[in-house]
Image (cartoon, rainbow, N blue to C red):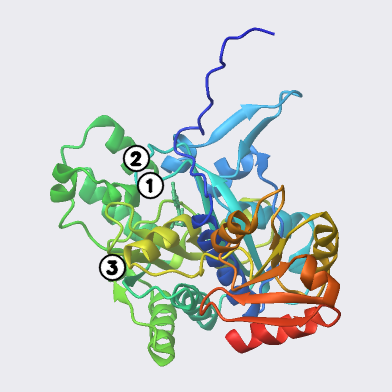
Amino acid sequence: MTDKKLSKIAAPKGVPDYIPPVSAEFITIRDTFAHQVRLAGYDHIELPIFEETALFARGVGESTDVVSKEMYTFADRGDRMVTLRPEGTAGVMRVVIEHNLDRGQLPVKLSYYGPFFRYERPQAGRYRQLQQVGVEAIGVDDPALDAEVIALADRCFRSIGLSGYRLELTSLGDSSCRPAYREKLQEFLFTLPLDDETRRRAEINPLRVLDDKRPEVKEMTAEAPLMLDYLSDESRSHFETVTGLLEDLGVRYQINPRMVRGLDYYTKTCFEFVHDGLGAQSGIGGGGRYDGLMAQLGGQELSGIGFGLGVDRALLALQAEQKSVSDGSRVDVFGVALGSVAKKRMVLLVDALRAAGIRADMSYGDRGLKGAMKGADRAGAKFALVLGESELETGTVAVKNLRDHEQETIALESAVETISALIDNEA
Ligand code: HAM
């Protein structure tokens, strides 16, 4: 043992800690999204946190920043290259193919949530560990399904009370019109004085050049041909059905013909939810259809559509709108026992309250009445239960309403039922 004080260890750069009371907001947002997607018939799937690197290289696309610059990739102890998942769609496809989920009833509707990892430059709202709730509907290319997925994302955001966002929409066409458009775009781009790296990008995936944030490139590409002007009849009618259904559903949208998503697998419908209160990192969720992804990963030629909603950014957006989804309380009831006999009885009462589904905690250590009542306040409890010698003698417990400071004495024997009724009355 030395007397030297060890240095503290901080969280890895770009990784958020969610601590109380914000963690309650975080969990409520995630759970509300998860609840909404369950209501729409999406089954939960628990995906591995890491996968073979090839899955993302092939699935997400080599020309994307996500694959070329941002993956947490390492060799495991058996020298296999593995990657912390940067997104969920490729992993879901792998599972569907591996477990033949696409051999049954279609569409296969799956949802997932949890952390994803991207080695991005950290800034407000851009993290290296980010959290999403996502869905994928696989196996049916029906524009009604596109509308369902988009409307579901919108419902998720509304259900946490968000309102200051807009939905942007476009179509990226399909294999019958995209190649011709790609050529047109490349023809245009190759006339521009692009630097070598950008030119290379234009060769691999010219769409990505339209996503370049540098003002000089933006200016040069302002007149670039747009996919929406080159859609095949089939893609156009698909897109029109989607937008028509969204209108019927009352989901407002704007067409953004220059939208470029950060992942390569998209075809046809593509969308992004953008919040105005977030600054540069304004995308709170996005997704789209992907026709070729499953085949690209060795599966059948099946189309799919899905979204990923950013839980971290939804939380930031909620804070920007000065809204909250949690009342900040840890429990409803807080037990205050005075003396060791009372404490033993309180342990049982708190246990019985929890068994009845009531959120309950109690004071520990030898705190006096005042200190213990402070604990009740800090926990955000609605009621404090005070059990002292005199209550024990009469088989009662004092219930203090911490909002209006009214106090009443109830029978200890039927305390759980009485407290349960009191809580229902407060709600
Ligand atoms: P994505 O647009 O890359 O799509 O990510 C979805 C959402 O995750 C974004 O809109 C954003 O809210 C959040 N997000 C992404 N990167 C970060 C970051 N560094 N920090 C904080 N939040 C972030 C996908 O991942 C696709 N897999 C979605 C999808 C599902 N498409 C079809 N199916």
Residue 30 in percent (x, y) is at 56, 64
Residue 205, numbered circle = 1
Three-letter amino acid code at disc 1?
Answer: Asn
Residue 320, numbered circle = none
Label 3 – label 1 distance at C-alpha = 19 Å
Three-letter amino acid code at disc 2?
Answer: Arg
Left or right of 109? Residue 341 is: right
Q: Nearer the viewer, residue 279 or 18?
A: 18
Which of marks 1 and 3 precedes in the sequence?
1
Which of marks 2 and 3 precedes in the sequence?
2
Q: Nearer the viewer, residue 172 or 243?
A: 243
Instruction: Tell me if label 2 and label 1 are in contact, CB under 8 Å.
Output: yes
Residue 396 drawn above or below residue 289: below
Residue 201, numbered circle = 2
View extreme (bottom): residue: 248
Residue 4 drawn above or below residue 387: above
Dividing the picture into quadrants, the one containing residue 109 is bottom right
Residue density around tag 1, few if under 14, some if 14–19, many if 20 or more, within 10 Å: some
Instruction: Tell me if label 3 and label 1 are in contact, CB under 8 Å.
Output: no
Q: Residue at x 27, y 64 (%)?
A: 276
Can you identify the residue that label 3 sits on?
256
